[in-house]
Amino acid sequence: MSTERDQQFLQIQGLAKTYPGATEPVFDEVNFGIARGEFVCIIGHSGCGKTTILNVLAGLEEASAGTVIMDNREVSGPSLERGVVFQSHALMPWLTVRQNVAFAVKSKWPDWSPTQVKGHVEKYVDMVGLSHAIDKKPSQLSGGMKQRVGIARAFAIEPKMLLLDEPFGALDALTRGTIQEELLKICAATHQTVFMITHDVDEAILLADKILLMSNGPVARVAEVVRNTLPRDRQRATLHHEPGFYELRNHLVDFLVSRSKELSRGRAPANPPEVRPADAARSAVAAAALAAGPAANGAASVTHLHRVA
Ligand SMILES: Nc1ncnc2c1ncn2[C@@H]1O[C@H](COP(=O)(O)OP(=O)(O)OP(=O)(O)O)[C@@H](O)[C@H]1O
Ligand SMILES: [Mg+2]
């Protein structure tokens, strides 16, 4: 059973950042929470401060104001409890793929035998489809392959919290799809808590339980929390057939096109409201199917809606 504490696995309160020499904060009054096992995406225009927030959560950057509490402890510096995939891959160029991942694994579990480390590293390198390149150095890999090594490294330390900064940005559509689905599977199996930055609304709808919409900077804020109420077992290939998909998608795109600008410069509320744009359409489809009776074609999807509600 979930407790109050589980609901508040990660708590961000009053976060603000002003870089030295700047007259205005990049963002202020950023407030949100992440439940244990929740997959949260953050979307916002370039420069609004998404990477800065992620770096604060990682303990790599100090906020100018506010607090980050993870699992009842204040975040104050980097830790192997949090695995980070950076916007640029950040691999050690003199080490091979195997050695890059093993370095992180050995830091997390210094007592492991070489055989244990080897098995663990190979499992995660295989997960991102790079077994054939495991003994190559980053300079011998494509951009997308380097990014996949970064993903394998972050997963390999099995962190309490995964922090992903546009991890699939450099990947081709096919690889991106495969890794997105792999990520969903692993998260479902491990109940991994994830905070991920993306520019891709379809990616956010596929992966996230909750999507944070960030207004434009300077003085950006998390303006709204969008709850994704499409079934958790959604698939990339059929997602767009789900009732409510387009309502949810349009809501996100409308925010990026107009509201993110209207709510810039501190005009967004400090405590963002939570909205559920897919709900009305999903209820309407469920009601129509019920009215049509159990023999109707929609009966299966009604059962499905009830199960996920
Ligand atoms: N070290 C720094 N010193 C000064 N200003 C910085 C520094 N890092 C970032 N900024 C500024 O802070 C703002 C937010 O940067 P950040 O990288 O967090 O944005 P972002 O939302 O991740 O953007 P993108 O989507 O392009 O990655 C930008 O205006 C950027 O110029
Ligand atoms: Mg960024």
Image (spheres, rainbow, N blue to C red):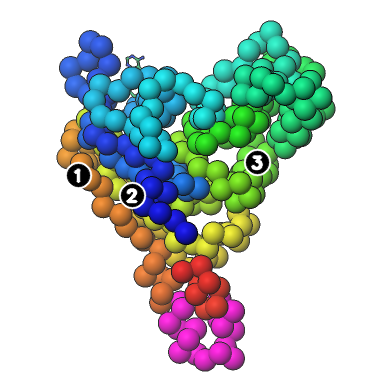
Magenta stretch, main secondary structure, is helix
- Residue placed furthest toward the top: 94
Q: Magenta region: which residues? A: 285-301
- The one nearer the camera, 161 or 223, is 161
Q: Is residue 91 magenta?
A: no
Q: Quadrant of residue 156?
A: top right
Mark sitting earlier along the chain (3/1): 3
For badge 1, the amino acid type reads: Pro
Q: Which mark is residue 225?
A: 2
Residue 15 in sight from this viewpoint: yes
Q: Position of residue 257 (x, y in %)?
A: 33, 44
Element on which disc 3 rests = helix
Residue at 22% of width from left, 15% of height from top?
22
Q: CA separation, marks 2 and 3?
A: 25 Å
Q: Position of residue 186 (x, y in %)?
A: 64, 45
For badge 2, the amino acid type reads: Val
Circle 3 residue: 179
